[in-house]
Image (cartoon, rainbow, N blue to C red):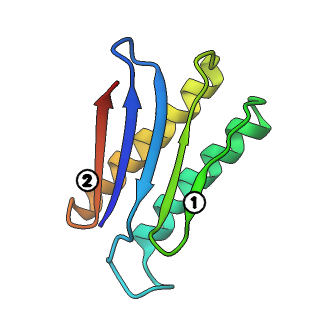
Amino acid sequence: MTTVIFRKTRQGEYRSLRCSGHAGYAEYGSDIVCAALSILVINTLNSLEELCGLSIEPETDEKSGLIACGFPEDMDERAVLLLDSLALGCVTIEKQYGRKYCKVKFEEV
């Protein structure tokens, strides 16, 4: 199962993201759930850098399926919108394929 954790402040500001594990929906190379989540996360992080000018330094480990990073405190509304879109995409995948393959959590920090 892939777990996606969004950590936010009480005020709703994003502080970090952690996506880990392999969905296990299908064999390696054919797992559409894992591929969809990976693409969403990687594209969002790339967009935060390229479109919003943020310096994102993710921690990654392909073997465990880890992509994790923290976010700066001064993100503008474009960056927040990108992360809101990522959260929506992940929650939609969780609803469509089930928590057996994808679990999305929101934690307060």
Secondary element at tag 1:
strand
Mark whose residue sits in front, 2 or 1? 1
Which residue corresponds to mark 1?
60
Badge 2 or badge 1: first in the primary sequence: 1
- Screen quadrant of the C terminus: top left
Quadrant location of residue 52?
top right
Can you tell which mark lies on residue 95?
2
In the rendered image, residue 17, in percent from the top left (x then y), is placed at: 47, 41
Q: Which residue corresponds to the image point at 36% horizontal and 44% vertical from the top-left?
A: 5
Residue 95 position (above or below residue 75): below
Work out how far the residue at label 2 is from the one at label 1, CA to CA, in angstroms: 26 Å
Residue 33, position as x, y percentages in the image: 40, 68
Amino acid tagged 2:
Lys
Q: Residues within 10 Å of mark 2 (few under 14, many from 20)?
A: few
Marker count (numbered): 2
In the image, taking residue 100 as reference, residue 38 lies left or right, namely right
Is residue 49 depicted above or below 23 in this figure? above
Q: How far from the left and from the top, in percent, is residue 12?
A: 39, 18
